[in-house]
Image (spheres, helix red, strand yellow):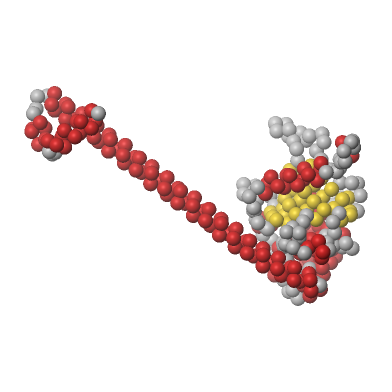
Amino acid sequence: MRFIDPRTDFAFKKIFGSTGHEGVLRSFLNAILYDGRNEIQELKLQDPYNIPRLKGLKDSYLDVRVRQQNGEWILIEMQVINVPGLEKRILFNAAKQYSNQLLQGEEYEKLAPVVLLTITDFVMFKDWPKIISRYRLVEQDLMVEYPANDVQLAFVELPKFTKTHDQATELWEKWLCFIKEANSLEMVPASLAQVPQIQEAFTIANYAKLEPEEADILDKQTMWWGDQRKIHKLYAQQQQDYEQIKVQRDQAQTERDRAQANEQQARQALRCTAIALRQSGLDDKRICQMMNMSQQQLDEVLTETAD
């Protein structure tokens, strides 16, 4: 049995954004955002998965957008590559969803909270060990939340999660195992099958059950993302090589500057010595013998520094 990779845009949206399978998404969100508590009981997909919306690769690059029964919004995005400006784009998407709720003339009280959940297949916060992190508006000194704290950003960094399905005990851990391991499994592990919604997710992810058009889209997107990963890896390597060359160039320049400064100091010392010997009454011939240099060299030392 072969399962599609939930980390691709197409597969992620099909698994978590399909009408009739809202229980899968509800279980996943409760696990990630609410520590497994059944906080989200009802939700409605705002742009559910369907093939016509996924004709092109760019068209398939869509967030899963849901609205809870209480009106609150949750946006979910699977991000495979750490593209430039990603941090700003995430904030922009959350702010755009928040502001687009109102029509002209409507009251601000109608604005509903927005949570944007970004799942990354790379480490986004290198100095932060947490796998799941959440951000809200707080006062910078007292860490008191802003009264209308309606925009939240949540992140799941998959590389930081290192447990396998045999080691996962918490619901959120089992969901992350599904996302990371599904594509490499040939059967549903018993530890994950214990969760009905994860079992249902594996059923949706069964490659054999895809429509021919879906399989074609998935295969093309998988190849496209593979190419993008290679390009990104090559670019990252080139950037690393450039930084190393820059460091080496700067070090070489520092060494040249240091050598030049040492040479100038040495020439200055020679001049001071020559002047002192002249002032002691010695003639240039005797000075040249003592300093092991020709008359021309002595003249150059005195003239260069004097200028």
Q: Residue at x 85, y 65 (%)?
A: 196
Q: Residue at x 29, y 38 (%)?
A: 262
Q: Is residue 15 visible?
A: no
Snapshot quadrant of residue 1: bottom right
- Choose between 79 and 129: the one closer to the eye: 79
In the image: residue 194, left or right of residue 86: right
Counting every numbered tag in the picture gives 0
Residue 33, image x, y percentages: 79, 50
In the image: residue 305, left or right of residue 242: left
Snapshot quadrant of residue 136: top right
Q: Residue at x 86, y 41 (%)?
A: 102
Residue 13, image x, y percentages: 79, 61
In the image: residue 240, left or right of residue 35: left
Residue 192, image x, y percentages: 78, 66
Q: Quadrant of the C terminus?
A: top left
- Choose between 60 and 276: the one closer to the eye: 60
Q: Residue at x 87, y 50 (%)?
A: 67
Q: Is residue 228 visible?
A: yes
Residue 90, image x, y percentages: 72, 47
- Choose between 150 and 217: the one closer to the eye: 217
In the image: residue 130, left or right of residue 13: left
